[in-house]
Amino acid sequence: MRLHTPLLACTVLALSLTACQGPQAEQAKRDAASAADHAAAATDQALDKAAAKTEAASERASAYAQDAAQNASAAAERAGDATRDAAARAADATADAAQTTADKARDMAEKANQAAKDDDAKR
C-alpha cells in the first residue's frame, strides 16, 4: 500500500496537469515526470529491501532447519547407543541368571547323588 500511494498520486497529478496549457503546463508535466521517476525509484528500493529481507529470512530458516536435523540425528544416535547398551545389559543379566540356575541345578544334582550314595552305603 505504501508503494502504490506515491504512484497513484503522481498519476493523478500528471493527469490533472496535462489539462493545463502554456509554460506552466510544461513545468507541471516535467514535475509530474520527475515525481513519477522518484516514485519508481522508491518502489525499486522497497522491492530490493523486501527481497534482501526475504533472502536473509530464508537463510536463517535454512540454518535453523540444518541445526534441527543435526540435533535430531545426534538424538537418534544417542537413542541407538542407549538401546544397544540396554540390550547388552539384558543379555548379560540373562546369561548371569542362566549360570545361577545351572549352578543350583548342579548343586542339587550333587546332593541327590550324595544322598543316593549314602543310601546305598547304609544298605
Image (cartoon, helix red, strand yellow):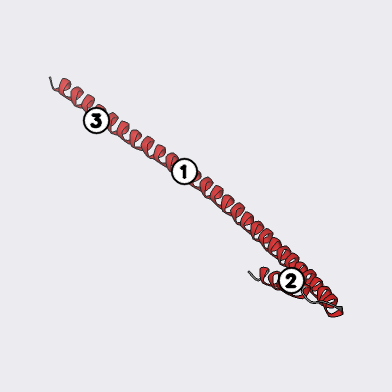
Q: 32 left or right of 54?
A: right
Residue marked by disc 2 = 15
Q: Inspect the image, locate mark 3, and give the three-letter code of the amino acid beneath it.
A: Met
Q: Separation of disc 3 and disc 2 at Cα?
A: 114 Å
Name the residue at 87% across, 79% down. 23
Q: Earlier in the sequence, mark 3 or mark 2?
A: 2
Looking at the rendering, which quadrant does residue 106 occupy?
Answer: top left
Q: Residue furthest bottom?
A: 24
Give the residue type at disc 1: Asp
Sequence-first tag of 3 and 1: 1
* Residue 10: x %, y % from top left: 73, 72
Placement of 30 over or under 105, stated as above or below: below
How far, Cα to Cα, is label 2 from label 1?
81 Å
Give the class, few, some or many, for how many residues have Cα within 10 Å of label 2's Cα (few <14, many ≥20): few
Q: Residue at x 84, y 74 (%)?
A: 30
Q: Position of residue 88 (x, y in %)?
A: 44, 39
Badge 1: residue crowd in 10 Å (few <14, some 14–19, many ≥20)? few
Q: Name the residue carrying label 3.
A: 108
Instruction: Name which residue type carries label 2.
Output: Leu
Identify which residue, 115 or 11, lies in the foreground. Answer: 11
Q: Residues within 10 Å of mark 3 (few under 14, many from 20)?
A: few
Q: Which mark is residue 118?
A: none
Say if mark 3 contacts mark 1, CB within 8 Å.
Answer: no
SS label for mark 1 = helix
Q: Quadrant of residue 59?
A: bottom right
**Circle 2 sits in a helix, a strand or a loop, which is it?**
helix
Quadrant of image for the N terminus: bottom right
Cβ atoms under marks 2 and 1 closer than 8 Å: no
